[in-house]
Image: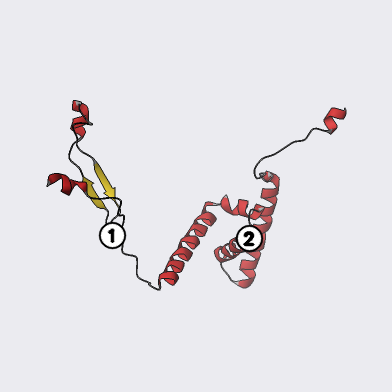
Amino acid sequence: MLLLFFMFNFNFGKKKPDKKKIIIISILLCGIVATLSQCSGVSENVLWDLLDEIQRKYFPQTIINEIIIQDPNKIERRVHRDVDNAIKEYERLTKNSEPPIITLPKFIESPLDKDLCYTEECQSLGGEMRLCAPWMDTCKDTSETDQK
């Protein structure tokens, strides 16, 4: 009997909310959002977005977040908002509203090194091929020096 008194139940990580709680709070939130939408004339999507942003800033990792994550439409709207905010931040930081110019990578192809590759199967693959970022100095084009 004394042994049962000293037993502890340790849980690691975040505890999952009860399904019953999720259903009850989800029904309440849907009702509140629908009522506010009817009374104010504001779209339900805008109200869900507002609720999502408020809970992300002031009440992170709550049951409201679990409800929003489980709905594919709400999570898709969250992703679009995050991407739009990232684009606006990029434009603000660079003071440039035009899309960024992405330079093409350098394609480097080296001839076959028969010292390392001596079987027929290996030689049928050919030499080394690489793609390198043009701004990286560590990726030198060795194919030009080998051919000279």
* Whether residue 6 is situated above or below residue 81 in the rendered picture: above
Q: Amino acid at mark 2?
A: Gln
Q: Which residue is mark 1?
A: 103
Q: Residue 141 or 108: which is nearer the viewer?
A: 141
Q: Residues within 10 Å of mark 2 (few under 14, many from 20)?
A: some
Q: Secondary structure at mark 2?
A: helix
Q: Residues within 10 Å of mark 1 (few under 14, many from 20)?
A: few
Q: Position of residue 48 (x, y in %)?
A: 59, 62
Residue 90: name its quadrant. Answer: bottom left
* 40 to the left or right of 126: right
Q: Residue 2 or 15: which is nearer the viewer?
A: 2
Residue drawn at (72%, 37%), measured in percent from left and top?
Answer: 10
* 113 to the left or right of 64: left
Residue drawn at (61%, 62%), measured in percent from left and top?
Answer: 57
Quadrant of image for the N terminus: top right
Q: Residue 37 or 123: which is nearer the viewer?
A: 123
Q: Residue 124 or 75: which is nearer the viewer?
A: 124
Residue found at the very far left of the displayed protein: 148
Image disc number at residue 55: 2
